[in-house]
Amino acid sequence: MTETKNLASIGVVGLAVMGSNLARNFAHNGNTVAVYNRSPEKTRALIADHGDEGSFIPSETIEDFVASLERPRKAIIMVQAGKATDAVISQLVEAMDEGDIIIDGGNSLYTDTIRREKEVAAKGRHFVGAGISGGEEGALNGPSIMPGGPKESWETLGPILESIAANVDGTPCVTHIGPDGAGHFVKMVHNGIEYADMQVIGEAYQLLRYGLNLEPAAIADIFREWNQGDLDSYLIEITAEVLAQKDPATGAPLVDVILDAAGQKGTGRWTAINGLELGTPVTAIAEAVFARGLSSATAQRAAAQEGGLPAGIIDDGGVDPDEFVEDVRRALYASKLIAYSQGFDEIKAGSDQYGWDVDPRDLATIWRGGCIIRAKFLNRIREAYDTNPELPALILDPYFKGELEDLIQPWRRVVAAATHMGLPVPVFASSLSYYDSLRAERLPAALIQGQRDFFGAHTFKRTDREGTFHIEWSTDRSLTQTDA
Ligand code: 6PG
Protein backbone atom coordinates (compact mmCIF):
# COMPACT_ATOMS: atom_id res chain seq x y z
CA MET A 1 0.00 0.00 0.00
CA THR A 2 1.37 3.43 -0.89
CA GLU A 3 1.19 6.07 1.75
CA THR A 4 -0.84 9.10 0.66
CA LYS A 5 0.67 12.15 2.19
CA ASN A 6 -1.37 15.24 2.92
CA LEU A 7 0.23 18.07 0.96
CA ALA A 8 -0.12 21.82 1.36
CA SER A 9 -1.68 23.96 -1.35
CA ILE A 10 0.46 26.95 -0.35
CA GLY A 11 3.54 27.58 1.77
CA VAL A 12 4.73 30.59 3.75
CA VAL A 13 8.43 31.23 4.40
CA GLY A 14 9.15 33.77 7.14
CA LEU A 15 6.91 33.71 10.17
CA ALA A 16 7.27 37.13 11.73
CA VAL A 17 3.91 38.77 12.39
CA MET A 18 3.00 39.44 8.73
CA GLY A 19 4.03 35.95 7.60
CA SER A 20 2.34 34.09 10.42
CA ASN A 21 -0.84 36.15 10.07
CA LEU A 22 -0.91 35.43 6.36
CA ALA A 23 -0.38 31.71 7.03
CA ARG A 24 -3.25 31.75 9.53
CA ASN A 25 -5.45 33.57 7.02
CA PHE A 26 -4.75 30.83 4.43
CA ALA A 27 -5.56 28.18 7.03
CA HIS A 28 -8.76 29.94 8.15
CA ASN A 29 -9.94 29.82 4.56
CA GLY A 30 -9.63 26.08 4.12
CA ASN A 31 -6.13 25.86 2.68
CA THR A 32 -3.54 23.45 4.03
CA VAL A 33 -0.52 25.67 4.66
CA ALA A 34 3.13 24.66 4.81
CA VAL A 35 5.10 26.91 7.15
CA TYR A 36 8.83 27.44 7.55
CA ASN A 37 11.03 29.93 9.34
CA ARG A 38 14.83 30.05 9.42
CA SER A 39 14.83 29.84 13.21
CA PRO A 40 12.44 26.99 14.07
CA GLU A 41 11.26 28.62 17.32
CA LYS A 42 8.92 30.88 15.35
CA THR A 43 7.46 27.89 13.47
CA ARG A 44 6.94 26.03 16.73
CA ALA A 45 5.35 29.11 18.33
CA LEU A 46 2.93 29.50 15.42
CA ILE A 47 1.85 25.86 15.70
CA ALA A 48 1.65 26.00 19.51
CA ASP A 49 -0.41 29.20 19.54
CA HIS A 50 -2.52 28.79 16.43
CA GLY A 51 -2.09 25.23 15.17
CA ASP A 52 -5.72 24.44 15.98
CA GLU A 53 -7.04 27.20 13.69
CA GLY A 54 -6.67 25.12 10.54
CA SER A 55 -4.42 22.73 8.69
CA PHE A 56 -0.68 23.52 8.94
CA ILE A 57 2.35 21.48 7.91
CA PRO A 58 5.37 22.81 9.80
CA SER A 59 8.90 22.13 8.57
CA GLU A 60 12.29 22.85 10.03
CA THR A 61 14.30 22.64 6.80
CA ILE A 62 13.60 24.27 3.48
CA GLU A 63 13.80 20.84 1.77
CA ASP A 64 11.07 19.40 4.00
CA PHE A 65 9.03 22.54 3.47
CA VAL A 66 9.25 22.22 -0.32
CA ALA A 67 8.48 18.49 -0.12
CA SER A 68 5.31 19.28 1.82
CA LEU A 69 3.84 21.34 -1.05
CA GLU A 70 1.56 20.00 -3.76
CA ARG A 71 2.59 20.63 -7.38
CA PRO A 72 2.94 23.11 -8.90
CA ARG A 73 4.40 24.23 -5.60
CA LYS A 74 3.52 27.69 -4.42
CA ALA A 75 5.54 29.40 -1.69
CA ILE A 76 5.16 32.97 -0.44
CA ILE A 77 8.23 34.63 0.97
CA MET A 78 7.47 37.01 3.86
CA VAL A 79 10.96 38.00 4.97
CA GLN A 80 12.69 41.38 5.03
CA ALA A 81 12.99 42.98 1.60
CA GLY A 82 16.53 42.96 0.23
CA LYS A 83 19.29 40.42 0.89
CA ALA A 84 17.13 38.10 3.01
CA THR A 85 14.65 37.79 0.14
CA ASP A 86 17.44 36.96 -2.34
CA ALA A 87 18.78 34.29 0.00
CA VAL A 88 15.40 32.58 0.39
CA ILE A 89 14.74 32.76 -3.36
CA SER A 90 17.96 30.90 -4.15
CA GLN A 91 17.18 28.23 -1.56
CA LEU A 92 13.71 27.76 -3.00
CA VAL A 93 14.92 27.72 -6.59
CA GLU A 94 17.38 25.02 -5.60
CA ALA A 95 14.80 22.87 -3.81
CA MET A 96 11.92 23.38 -6.27
CA ASP A 97 11.21 22.02 -9.73
CA GLU A 98 10.23 23.33 -13.14
CA GLY A 99 6.90 25.20 -13.10
CA ASP A 100 6.85 25.81 -9.32
CA ILE A 101 5.93 29.32 -8.20
CA ILE A 102 7.88 31.55 -5.83
CA ILE A 103 5.97 34.57 -4.57
CA ASP A 104 7.66 37.52 -2.88
CA GLY A 105 5.04 39.13 -0.64
CA GLY A 106 7.35 41.78 0.85
CA ASN A 107 7.73 45.45 0.00
CA SER A 108 10.46 44.80 -2.57
CA LEU A 109 11.74 47.43 -4.94
CA TYR A 110 10.16 46.68 -8.30
CA THR A 111 13.48 46.80 -10.15
CA ASP A 112 14.69 44.00 -7.84
CA THR A 113 11.54 42.11 -8.75
CA ILE A 114 12.23 42.53 -12.48
CA ARG A 115 15.77 41.21 -11.95
CA ARG A 116 14.60 38.30 -9.76
CA GLU A 117 11.90 37.32 -12.22
CA LYS A 118 14.51 37.03 -14.98
CA GLU A 119 16.86 35.01 -12.79
CA VAL A 120 14.17 32.66 -11.54
CA ALA A 121 12.59 32.24 -14.98
CA ALA A 122 16.00 31.28 -16.38
CA LYS A 123 15.91 28.33 -13.96
CA GLY A 124 12.43 27.28 -15.12
CA ARG A 125 10.55 28.43 -12.03
CA HIS A 126 7.94 31.19 -11.91
CA PHE A 127 8.46 34.29 -9.85
CA VAL A 128 5.65 36.55 -8.72
CA GLY A 129 6.34 39.83 -6.93
CA ALA A 130 3.15 40.54 -5.01
CA GLY A 131 2.42 43.73 -3.11
CA ILE A 132 0.40 42.98 0.01
CA SER A 133 -1.25 45.81 1.87
CA GLY A 134 -3.24 46.01 5.06
CA GLY A 135 -0.63 45.68 7.77
CA GLU A 136 -0.79 42.95 10.38
CA GLU A 137 -4.54 43.04 10.71
CA GLY A 138 -5.04 42.89 6.94
CA ALA A 139 -2.68 39.94 6.59
CA LEU A 140 -4.82 38.04 9.09
CA ASN A 141 -8.31 39.06 8.04
CA GLY A 142 -8.07 40.06 4.40
CA PRO A 143 -5.41 42.18 2.70
CA SER A 144 -5.41 43.84 -0.69
CA ILE A 145 -3.01 41.91 -2.90
CA MET A 146 -1.22 43.17 -6.00
CA PRO A 147 0.52 40.27 -7.75
CA GLY A 148 2.73 40.78 -10.80
CA GLY A 149 4.64 38.05 -12.61
CA PRO A 150 3.64 35.79 -15.49
CA LYS A 151 -0.03 35.55 -16.36
CA GLU A 152 0.02 31.75 -16.19
CA SER A 153 1.09 31.88 -12.54
CA TRP A 154 -2.01 33.94 -11.85
CA GLU A 155 -4.19 31.15 -13.24
CA THR A 156 -2.81 28.86 -10.53
CA LEU A 157 -2.45 31.42 -7.80
CA GLY A 158 -5.60 33.45 -8.38
CA PRO A 159 -8.11 31.24 -6.54
CA ILE A 160 -5.90 30.76 -3.51
CA LEU A 161 -5.13 34.49 -3.21
CA GLU A 162 -8.79 35.30 -3.73
CA SER A 163 -9.59 33.00 -0.80
CA ILE A 164 -7.66 35.24 1.64
CA ALA A 165 -8.05 38.72 0.17
CA ALA A 166 -10.42 41.36 1.50
CA ASN A 167 -13.75 41.40 -0.26
CA VAL A 168 -15.85 44.42 -1.23
CA ASP A 169 -19.36 43.90 -2.60
CA GLY A 170 -18.48 40.32 -3.52
CA THR A 171 -15.29 41.30 -5.37
CA PRO A 172 -12.00 40.08 -3.91
CA CYS A 173 -9.33 42.76 -3.51
CA VAL A 174 -6.77 40.97 -5.66
CA THR A 175 -6.11 40.72 -9.37
CA HIS A 176 -3.19 40.16 -11.70
CA ILE A 177 -1.62 43.58 -12.14
CA GLY A 178 0.77 42.85 -15.00
CA PRO A 179 4.04 41.07 -15.78
CA ASP A 180 7.30 41.01 -13.79
CA GLY A 181 7.62 44.06 -11.51
CA ALA A 182 4.11 45.49 -12.09
CA GLY A 183 2.73 44.27 -8.75
CA HIS A 184 5.51 45.68 -6.64
CA PHE A 185 5.55 48.90 -8.67
CA VAL A 186 1.87 49.44 -7.99
CA LYS A 187 2.35 48.60 -4.30
CA MET A 188 5.17 51.16 -4.17
CA VAL A 189 2.89 53.86 -5.55
CA HIS A 190 0.13 52.72 -3.17
CA ASN A 191 2.56 53.40 -0.34
CA GLY A 192 3.53 56.76 -1.83
CA ILE A 193 -0.14 57.71 -1.87
CA GLU A 194 -0.38 56.40 1.69
CA TYR A 195 2.40 58.83 2.72
CA ALA A 196 0.60 61.76 1.05
CA ASP A 197 -2.76 60.75 2.53
CA MET A 198 -1.25 60.58 6.02
CA GLN A 199 0.49 63.92 5.55
CA VAL A 200 -2.66 65.79 4.42
CA ILE A 201 -4.46 64.40 7.45
CA GLY A 202 -1.52 65.60 9.52
CA GLU A 203 -1.74 69.07 8.00
CA ALA A 204 -5.46 69.28 8.74
CA TYR A 205 -4.73 68.26 12.34
CA GLN A 206 -1.97 70.88 12.62
CA LEU A 207 -4.34 73.64 11.46
CA LEU A 208 -7.11 72.62 13.85
CA ARG A 209 -4.71 72.14 16.72
CA TYR A 210 -2.52 75.22 16.39
CA GLY A 211 -4.69 77.43 14.20
CA LEU A 212 -7.89 76.95 16.21
CA ASN A 213 -6.25 75.74 19.45
CA LEU A 214 -8.52 72.70 19.67
CA GLU A 215 -7.65 69.81 21.97
CA PRO A 216 -6.82 66.40 20.39
CA ALA A 217 -10.04 64.86 21.76
CA ALA A 218 -12.11 67.58 20.08
CA ILE A 219 -10.23 67.05 16.84
CA ALA A 220 -10.88 63.31 17.15
CA ASP A 221 -14.61 64.12 17.13
CA ILE A 222 -14.17 66.24 14.01
CA PHE A 223 -12.35 63.41 12.22
CA ARG A 224 -15.07 61.00 13.31
CA GLU A 225 -17.61 63.26 11.70
CA TRP A 226 -15.52 63.65 8.55
CA ASN A 227 -15.39 59.88 8.35
CA GLN A 228 -19.14 59.88 7.68
CA GLY A 229 -18.76 61.78 4.41
CA ASP A 230 -16.53 62.02 1.33
CA LEU A 231 -13.41 61.40 3.40
CA ASP A 232 -14.70 58.07 4.78
CA SER A 233 -11.52 55.97 4.93
CA TYR A 234 -9.39 53.74 7.11
CA LEU A 235 -6.77 56.44 7.65
CA ILE A 236 -9.33 59.02 8.84
CA GLU A 237 -10.87 56.38 11.11
CA ILE A 238 -7.57 55.49 12.79
CA THR A 239 -6.66 59.18 13.05
CA ALA A 240 -9.70 59.70 15.28
CA GLU A 241 -8.60 56.69 17.37
CA VAL A 242 -5.06 58.00 17.78
CA LEU A 243 -6.22 61.52 18.66
CA ALA A 244 -8.70 60.27 21.24
CA GLN A 245 -6.10 58.07 22.91
CA LYS A 246 -4.66 59.09 26.28
CA ASP A 247 -1.10 58.22 27.22
CA PRO A 248 -1.33 55.28 29.67
CA ALA A 249 1.78 56.59 31.47
CA THR A 250 0.76 60.21 32.07
CA GLY A 251 -2.89 60.56 31.09
CA ALA A 252 -1.95 63.31 28.61
CA PRO A 253 -3.22 63.09 25.02
CA LEU A 254 -1.01 60.41 23.48
CA VAL A 255 -0.27 62.53 20.42
CA ASP A 256 1.36 65.12 22.70
CA VAL A 257 3.88 62.68 24.13
CA ILE A 258 4.87 61.01 20.84
CA LEU A 259 8.11 62.46 19.46
CA ASP A 260 7.21 64.37 16.30
CA ALA A 261 9.85 62.71 14.11
CA ALA A 262 8.23 60.47 11.47
CA GLY A 263 9.99 57.28 10.42
CA GLN A 264 9.94 55.60 7.05
CA LYS A 265 11.08 52.36 5.54
CA GLY A 266 11.56 53.69 2.05
CA THR A 267 8.61 52.88 -0.18
CA GLY A 268 7.39 56.51 -0.23
CA ARG A 269 10.91 57.66 -1.05
CA TRP A 270 11.11 55.15 -3.92
CA THR A 271 7.82 56.49 -5.28
CA ALA A 272 9.15 60.04 -5.26
CA ILE A 273 12.47 59.03 -6.83
CA ASN A 274 10.64 57.06 -9.49
CA GLY A 275 8.36 60.03 -10.16
CA LEU A 276 11.46 62.15 -10.77
CA GLU A 277 12.94 59.50 -13.04
CA LEU A 278 9.77 59.16 -15.07
CA GLY A 279 9.31 62.94 -15.19
CA THR A 280 5.90 62.56 -13.52
CA PRO A 281 5.25 65.26 -10.95
CA VAL A 282 4.17 63.41 -7.83
CA THR A 283 4.54 66.56 -5.79
CA ALA A 284 2.14 65.52 -3.02
CA ILE A 285 4.03 62.28 -2.45
CA ALA A 286 7.45 63.93 -2.64
CA GLU A 287 6.41 66.69 -0.21
CA ALA A 288 5.09 64.06 2.16
CA VAL A 289 8.43 62.23 2.05
CA PHE A 290 10.31 65.50 2.61
CA ALA A 291 7.98 66.40 5.46
CA ARG A 292 8.92 63.14 7.23
CA GLY A 293 12.58 63.91 6.57
CA LEU A 294 12.26 67.44 7.94
CA SER A 295 10.41 66.21 11.02
CA SER A 296 13.29 63.86 11.77
CA ALA A 297 15.96 66.57 11.39
CA THR A 298 15.57 67.17 15.11
CA ALA A 299 18.90 68.91 15.69
CA GLN A 300 18.33 71.33 12.83
CA ARG A 301 14.79 72.03 13.99
CA ALA A 302 16.01 72.71 17.53
CA ALA A 303 18.64 75.10 16.18
CA ALA A 304 16.00 76.88 14.08
CA GLN A 305 13.77 77.30 17.13
CA GLU A 306 16.62 78.56 19.29
CA GLY A 307 17.77 80.78 16.46
CA GLY A 308 14.54 82.73 16.76
CA LEU A 309 13.71 82.82 13.06
CA PRO A 310 11.20 85.62 12.45
CA ALA A 311 7.63 84.32 12.20
CA GLY A 312 6.07 87.34 10.47
CA ILE A 313 2.57 86.21 11.36
CA ILE A 314 -0.10 88.25 9.62
CA ASP A 315 -2.98 88.88 12.01
CA ASP A 316 -6.04 89.35 9.87
CA GLY A 317 -8.53 89.15 12.67
CA GLY A 318 -8.75 85.37 13.02
CA VAL A 319 -11.09 82.92 11.37
CA ASP A 320 -14.59 81.76 12.14
CA PRO A 321 -13.92 78.37 13.80
CA ASP A 322 -16.86 76.46 12.28
CA GLU A 323 -16.24 77.82 8.80
CA PHE A 324 -12.53 77.12 9.14
CA VAL A 325 -13.12 73.48 10.15
CA GLU A 326 -15.26 72.97 7.05
CA ASP A 327 -12.70 74.76 4.86
CA VAL A 328 -9.96 72.52 6.22
CA ARG A 329 -12.04 69.44 5.44
CA ARG A 330 -12.41 70.59 1.87
CA ALA A 331 -8.74 71.52 1.54
CA LEU A 332 -7.85 68.05 2.80
CA TYR A 333 -10.19 66.45 0.29
CA ALA A 334 -8.82 68.53 -2.60
CA SER A 335 -5.19 67.80 -1.70
CA LYS A 336 -5.95 64.11 -1.34
CA LEU A 337 -7.53 64.14 -4.76
CA ILE A 338 -4.33 65.61 -6.20
CA ALA A 339 -2.22 62.94 -4.47
CA TYR A 340 -4.30 60.15 -6.00
CA SER A 341 -4.42 61.84 -9.39
CA GLN A 342 -0.62 62.10 -9.38
CA GLY A 343 -0.21 58.53 -8.12
CA PHE A 344 -2.37 57.21 -10.96
CA ASP A 345 -0.30 59.32 -13.39
CA GLU A 346 2.85 57.65 -12.10
CA ILE A 347 1.32 54.21 -12.49
CA LYS A 348 0.40 55.01 -16.07
CA ALA A 349 3.88 56.36 -16.79
CA GLY A 350 5.54 53.28 -15.23
CA SER A 351 3.18 50.94 -17.04
CA ASP A 352 3.93 52.65 -20.37
CA GLN A 353 7.66 52.59 -19.73
CA TYR A 354 7.75 48.88 -18.93
CA GLY A 355 4.89 47.77 -21.20
CA TRP A 356 2.86 46.35 -18.30
CA ASP A 357 -0.57 47.43 -19.47
CA VAL A 358 -1.79 48.13 -15.93
CA ASP A 359 -5.50 48.92 -15.85
CA PRO A 360 -6.29 51.77 -13.42
CA ARG A 361 -9.79 50.30 -12.92
CA ASP A 362 -8.23 47.21 -11.36
CA LEU A 363 -6.38 49.30 -8.81
CA ALA A 364 -9.37 51.40 -7.90
CA THR A 365 -11.22 48.11 -7.41
CA ILE A 366 -8.71 46.21 -5.30
CA TRP A 367 -7.78 49.23 -3.17
CA ARG A 368 -11.37 49.62 -1.98
CA GLY A 369 -10.80 47.08 0.77
CA GLY A 370 -8.00 45.53 2.80
CA CYS A 371 -5.28 48.08 2.13
CA ILE A 372 -4.13 51.06 4.16
CA ILE A 373 -5.53 53.62 1.70
CA ARG A 374 -8.95 51.93 1.49
CA ALA A 375 -11.61 54.58 1.20
CA LYS A 376 -15.11 55.18 -0.04
CA PHE A 377 -13.58 57.63 -2.47
CA LEU A 378 -12.03 54.72 -4.43
CA ASN A 379 -15.49 53.78 -5.66
CA ARG A 380 -15.60 57.18 -7.33
CA ILE A 381 -12.16 56.64 -8.81
CA ARG A 382 -13.31 53.33 -10.21
CA GLU A 383 -16.36 54.96 -11.75
CA ALA A 384 -14.14 57.66 -13.25
CA TYR A 385 -11.90 55.10 -15.00
CA ASP A 386 -14.89 52.94 -15.90
CA THR A 387 -16.37 55.91 -17.74
CA ASN A 388 -13.08 56.79 -19.37
CA PRO A 389 -10.12 54.42 -18.99
CA GLU A 390 -7.99 56.94 -20.91
CA LEU A 391 -8.65 59.89 -18.57
CA PRO A 392 -5.73 62.32 -19.04
CA ALA A 393 -5.85 63.03 -15.28
CA LEU A 394 -8.14 61.81 -12.54
CA ILE A 395 -9.08 65.38 -11.62
CA LEU A 396 -10.46 65.87 -15.13
CA ASP A 397 -13.18 63.30 -14.54
CA PRO A 398 -16.54 65.13 -14.58
CA TYR A 399 -17.46 64.00 -11.06
CA PHE A 400 -14.17 65.15 -9.55
CA LYS A 401 -14.26 68.38 -11.56
CA GLY A 402 -17.66 69.00 -9.99
CA GLU A 403 -16.21 68.32 -6.55
CA LEU A 404 -13.38 70.75 -7.23
CA GLU A 405 -15.93 73.49 -7.95
CA ASP A 406 -16.89 73.20 -4.28
CA LEU A 407 -13.41 72.66 -2.98
CA ILE A 408 -11.30 75.20 -4.76
CA GLN A 409 -12.15 78.36 -2.83
CA PRO A 410 -11.99 76.77 0.64
CA TRP A 411 -8.68 75.23 -0.43
CA ARG A 412 -7.29 78.63 -1.42
CA ARG A 413 -8.58 80.17 1.82
CA VAL A 414 -6.94 77.47 3.92
CA VAL A 415 -3.56 77.76 2.19
CA ALA A 416 -3.72 81.55 2.58
CA ALA A 417 -4.78 81.29 6.24
CA ALA A 418 -2.06 78.75 7.01
CA THR A 419 0.50 81.05 5.41
CA HIS A 420 -0.73 84.00 7.47
CA MET A 421 -0.73 81.93 10.65
CA GLY A 422 2.77 80.63 9.93
CA LEU A 423 1.66 77.00 9.96
CA PRO A 424 3.31 74.55 7.56
CA VAL A 425 1.06 72.90 4.96
CA PRO A 426 3.52 71.50 2.41
CA VAL A 427 1.11 69.14 0.65
CA PHE A 428 -1.96 71.43 0.80
CA ALA A 429 0.09 74.29 -0.67
CA SER A 430 2.14 72.40 -3.24
CA SER A 431 -0.93 70.54 -4.44
CA LEU A 432 -2.70 73.83 -5.00
CA SER A 433 0.31 75.10 -6.99
CA TYR A 434 0.31 71.89 -9.02
CA TYR A 435 -3.39 72.39 -9.71
CA ASP A 436 -2.85 75.99 -10.76
CA SER A 437 0.12 74.96 -12.91
CA LEU A 438 -2.04 72.45 -14.76
CA ARG A 439 -4.69 75.10 -15.33
CA ALA A 440 -2.31 77.88 -16.35
CA GLU A 441 -2.50 78.97 -19.94
CA ARG A 442 1.13 80.09 -19.91
CA LEU A 443 3.87 78.83 -17.60
CA PRO A 444 7.19 80.53 -16.89
CA ALA A 445 8.81 77.61 -18.66
CA ALA A 446 9.01 79.94 -21.67
CA LEU A 447 11.31 82.20 -19.68
CA ILE A 448 13.35 79.22 -18.50
CA GLN A 449 13.83 78.14 -22.10
CA GLY A 450 15.01 81.68 -22.90
CA GLN A 451 17.49 81.56 -20.01
CA ARG A 452 18.77 78.17 -21.09
CA ASP A 453 19.27 79.41 -24.60
CA PHE A 454 21.04 82.51 -23.28
CA PHE A 455 23.69 80.78 -21.20
CA GLY A 456 24.02 77.45 -22.95
CA ALA A 457 22.59 77.75 -26.45
CA HIS A 458 20.14 75.04 -25.47
CA THR A 459 17.65 76.25 -28.14
CA PHE A 460 13.88 76.60 -27.89
CA LYS A 461 10.70 75.83 -29.80
CA ARG A 462 8.26 78.54 -30.85
CA THR A 463 4.55 78.90 -30.44
CA ASP A 464 4.03 80.16 -33.98
CA ARG A 465 6.09 77.84 -36.19
CA GLU A 466 7.76 74.43 -36.30
CA GLY A 467 11.48 73.97 -35.72
CA THR A 468 14.22 74.54 -33.16
CA PHE A 469 15.61 78.02 -32.66
CA HIS A 470 18.41 79.96 -31.03
CA ILE A 471 19.10 83.65 -30.47
CA GLU A 472 22.66 84.85 -31.10
CA TRP A 473 22.73 86.39 -27.64
CA SER A 474 26.35 87.56 -27.56
CA THR A 475 26.44 89.11 -31.03
CA ASP A 476 23.60 90.63 -33.00
CA ARG A 477 20.72 88.77 -31.29
CA SER A 478 19.44 87.47 -34.55
CA LEU A 479 17.23 84.39 -34.73
CA THR A 480 18.59 81.18 -36.26
CA GLN A 481 16.80 77.96 -36.92
CA THR A 482 19.14 75.23 -35.74
CA ASP A 483 17.36 72.28 -37.34
CA ALA A 484 16.90 73.85 -40.78
C1 6PG B 1 0.65 48.51 3.80
C2 6PG B 1 1.69 49.42 4.37
C3 6PG B 1 2.87 48.60 4.77
C4 6PG B 1 3.78 49.29 5.75
C5 6PG B 1 4.64 50.34 5.13
C6 6PG B 1 4.76 51.56 5.97
O1 6PG B 1 0.27 48.78 2.67
O2 6PG B 1 0.23 47.59 4.48
O3 6PG B 1 2.08 50.35 3.43
O4 6PG B 1 3.47 48.17 3.61
O5 6PG B 1 3.11 49.75 6.84
O6 6PG B 1 5.87 49.70 5.04
O7 6PG B 1 5.85 52.23 5.53
P1 6PG B 1 6.71 53.24 6.36
O8 6PG B 1 7.30 52.50 7.53
O9 6PG B 1 7.72 53.67 5.37
O10 6PG B 1 5.78 54.31 6.83
Image (cartoon, rainbow, N blue to C red):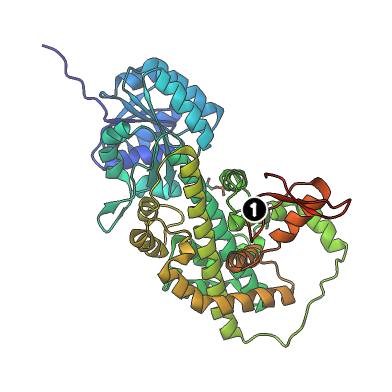
For residue 45, which quarter of the picture?
A: top left
Q: Residue at x 17, y 19 (%)?
A: 4
Q: As drawn, which residue projects farthest toward the left?
A: 1
Label 1 C-beta lies within 8 Å of the nearest ligand 1 atom: yes
Callout 1: helix, strand or loop? loop
Visible residue check, residue 72: yes
Q: Which residue is mark 1?
A: 262
Q: Quarter holding the C terminus?
A: top right
Q: Position of residue 129 (x, y in %)?
A: 43, 35
| Residue 429 horizontal/vertical position (percent) | 65, 67
Looking at numbered disc 1 in the image, what kind of residue is underneath it?
Ala
Between residue 320 and residue 250, name the one nearer to us: 320
Q: Position of residue 72 (x, y in %)?
A: 27, 24
Name the residue: 41% across, 73% down. 228
Q: Identify whether 19 is placed above or below 336.
A: above
Q: Position of 452 compared to 202: left or right? A: right
| Mark 1 surroundings within 10 Å by alpha-carbon count, few (fewer than 14), some (14 through 19), many (20 or more) | some
Camera-side residue of 435 and 43: 435
Looking at the image, residue 60 sits to the left or right of residue 203; the answer is left
How far across and down, in percent of the image, does residue 242 sit? 54, 63
